[in-house]
Image: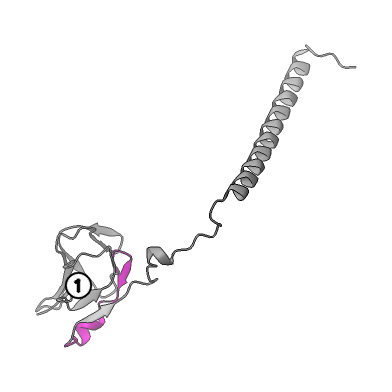
Amino acid sequence: MKTISVGRSPENDLIVQDVLVSSKHLLITQDHEGIYWIEDLNSTNGTWVGKEFLREGRQVITLDTILKIGDTVLVWQPYFLSLPAQPQEVTPLPAQPKPEEITSPLPAPTAENFSESHEQASITRILYWTAIGMGAFFVFLVLFWYMGYVKKP
């Protein structure tokens, strides 16, 4: 029987560097009959086993089962072909940017660009409501003409 432990803690066989993964997240076991089991260790964010969500308990899996914990898709099958002697580290794909690395595609608001964007929004709003009003006027004109309230010239 082979078992690998998965989580953020260095004590695991498969160490996952993902903030959404618990320190001791799950166990994957291959029993004496060759059947694979996944056991979520009551992790905070649970485990996706294919399209099913597992928060606690055990479930049978196959070699083609996709496992996702946090933002990380686990490639767990090679660990049962040859179990590594040393713990292995895995980083999530795509790598999670640190909050200080995240850049906004828009410039930070200043007094100048705030007033410009505010003016553009005002003009857009005026044009939008003008078009709505003209459309409503046209609809009522046609309706009144159809009902006979407006005479043809």
Q: Residues within 10 Å of mark 1 (few under 14, many from 20)?
A: many
Say whether residue 93 is left or right of residue 115: left
User: Which residue sits at x=84%, y=13%?
Assistant: 151
Residue tagged by mark 1? 6
Work out whether residue 103 or residue 39 is closer to the camera in this orientation and state it: 103
Residue 111 located within the stretch drawn in magenta: no
- The local secondary structure at tag 1 comes to strand
What residue span does the magenta drawing correspond to? 67-85
Say whether residue 148 is left or right of residue 93: right
Say whether residue 32 is left or right of residue 151: left
Expressed as whole percent of the image width and height from the top left, the position of residue 68 reads 29, 66
Work out whether residue 85 or residue 49 is closer to the camera in this orientation and state it: 85
Q: In which quadrant will I find the N terminus?
A: bottom left
The quadrant where residue 94 appears: bottom left
Expressed as whole percent of the image width and height from the top left, the position of residue 147 reads 74, 14
User: Which residue sits at x=75%, y=16%?
Assistant: 144
Residue 80 located within the stretch drawn in magenta: yes
Q: How many marks?
A: 1
Q: Amino acid at mark 1?
A: Val
The quadrant where residue 132 appears: top right
Expressed as whole percent of the image width and height from the top left, the position of residue 86 reads 18, 86
Expressed as whole percent of the image width and height from the top left, the position of residue 25 reads 18, 66
The quadrant where residue 76 appears: bottom left
Residue projecting furthest to the right:
153
